Image (tube, helix red, strand yellow):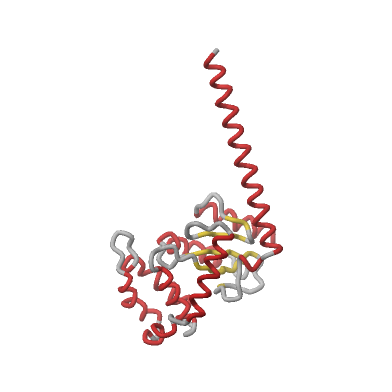
Amino acid sequence: MKYKVFLGISLALIGLFVATSFYYKNEQARMYGSMALNNSSVFVRDHSPTLGQADAKVTIVEFMDPACETCAAFSPIVKGMMKANPGKIKLTLRYAPFHDGADNFVKILEAARKQGKYWETLDVMFKSQSGWASHSNPQPQRIWEFLPKAGLDIDQIKKDMNDPAIAKLIEQDMADAKTLNVRKTPGFFVNGKPLEPFGAGQLRQLVQSELNANY
């Protein structure tokens, strides 16, 4: 008898947990959907670097940190989806430099943008990341060894990265990340829909569902 009572209580608690989780996810999806319609700037700002066709109907917004290993790992996954669906997907990057000193790497990226080398510099950063951003032995000063591979004027980068406008840009992105409850990187949204649960397969599924809905 006690076992049946215990089992009944356990099943009831499990049911309550599932129902609560379902309700929370629905409410969260509704909230993000409302933001995408009524406050789209929280996802994409005028300063946000974007890769892909302007008229693409699927937008991946990624809050990223140049020192984030997972961001580096997801970069070829996203580019692979874009290559497989030419003209249909665009990528917009937002900054969430959560690692210590990562705001300096963002400043380098933004300074590289002034030289027309933004995406080349990000690619070099990700590919050389283990040399300067290893969590077990970070050596941030070594990033300067790798940056010439992007074809940059390094002396000019060191000047331009101190532009106060870049610091304000980072501050805005961090504020938007907080509004959207982004607590770790990478944080993905596809047409305003958050990637939950997180994972490469889940990102592919979310992107494909938006492709199916819009094309």
Front position in the image: 120 or 211: 120
Residue 15 % position (x, y): 61, 32
Does residue 201 appear anywhere in the picture? Answer: yes
Establish if 33 lies above or below 127. above
Furthest-left residue in this view: 137
Residue at x-position 33% and y-position 77%: 144
Rendered residue at 38%/65% (across/down): 100
Taking the image as shown, residue 187 lies to the left or right of residue 162, namely right
180 vs 28: above or below:
below
Q: Residue 85's x, y, as percent?
A: 59, 65
Residue at point 53% right, 74% down?
Answer: 169
Give the x, y percent position of residue 170. 50, 71
The N terminus lies in quadrant? top right
Taking depth in this image into account, of 123 and 65 the one nearest to the observer is: 65
Quarter of the image for the C terminus: give it. Answer: bottom right
The image position of residue 174, as x and y in percent, is: 52, 66
Instruction: Determine if residue 215 is in view.
Output: no
